Amino acid sequence: MFFFSLIAIVYFAIRWIINHFIKNGVNKPYKKYTFISLIAAVLFLTVGAIASPTHRSSADQTSTSSRISSKHKKKNASNESKRKASISKANSIKEKESSESIAASKSESKEDSESIASSESESSKKQSEAESSSIAKASSESSVASSSSAKKASETSTTDNASYTQKGGWTTAASGMVFVSDSNKYYTSVKNPGNYQYMTQSAADNSGAKPAPRGNQYARP
């Protein structure tokens, strides 16, 4: 449409020029100028027809290129969006797995701590029971030994008491018997027999006791 308008403008411009020359006295045939104007219009039409496909093709190419570029941009944007979504999903899965792993590790650590505490408690309980049993046993043995010793001492004392004699405040040991003091000296006569151990002289010698070299107001060798 643009080219037809251009041809019409050129045609009427040439006719105006021809009329102008005619009015100004230029004596040339009118038909000749009309023919020239037609030729000029045809030339413009031909040039327009040739240029129009090129322009249209260029415009189509530009439009096609623009559409392709737009499609590529959209496709790239879609791919980028998908890639980001995939990365985000992968990170979310990793974080979830990491949190689950940490929770499992804490649970295992708690179970181990409880197991260790239980084991230590059982061990402590067993040790305490063993110590209590050992103490009770030792106490029982000590009690039995003490009882036995007391019984033996009582029997010995009874026998020994019957062996020594008392006269004038002095207690005299029987033949072959002595009174052993805390200083590991033994005497034959003492005033307080309860402060000495009464035993045979051979037993006193075997225990490391020695005969007193001299006497005093409480004991005589």
Image (tube, rainbow, N blue to C red):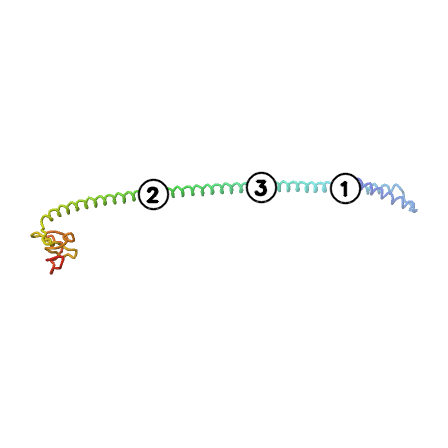
Q: Are marks 3 and 2 in contact (CB under 8 Å)?
A: no
Residue under the image location 45 percent in, 42 percent down: 103
As drawn, is 46 to the left or to the right of 65?
right
Q: Which of the two marks, 1 or 2, is nearer to us in this view?
A: 2
Give coordinates of residue 109: x percent, y percent: 40, 43
Q: Quadrant of residue 58?
A: top right
Q: Which of the two marks, 3 or 1, is nearer to us in this view?
A: 3
Give coordinates of residue 199: x percent, y percent: 11, 51
Q: Quadrant of residue 71?
A: top right
Q: Quadrant of the N terminus?
A: top right
Location of mark 3 (residue): 81
Q: Earlier in the sequence, mark 1 or mark 2?
A: 1
Using a 10 Å C-alpha cutoff, classify the residue at mark 1 as few (fewer than 14 neighbours), some (14 to 19) or many (20 or more): some
As drawn, is 157 to the left or to the right of 75?
left
Q: Quadrant of the C terminus?
A: bottom left
Residue under the image location 21 percent in, 44 percent down: 143
Q: Amino acid at mark 2?
A: Ser
Q: Earlier in the sequence, mark 3 or mark 2?
A: 3
Disc on res. 48: 1
Q: Amino acid at mark 1?
A: Gly
**Tally of numbered discs:** 3
Kind of element beneath mark 2: helix
Give coordinates of residue 36: x percent, y percent: 84, 43
How far is disc 1 from disc 2 in space, using C-alphas? 107 Å
Using a 10 Å C-alpha cutoff, classify the residue at mark 2 as few (fewer than 14 neighbours), some (14 to 19) or many (20 or more): few
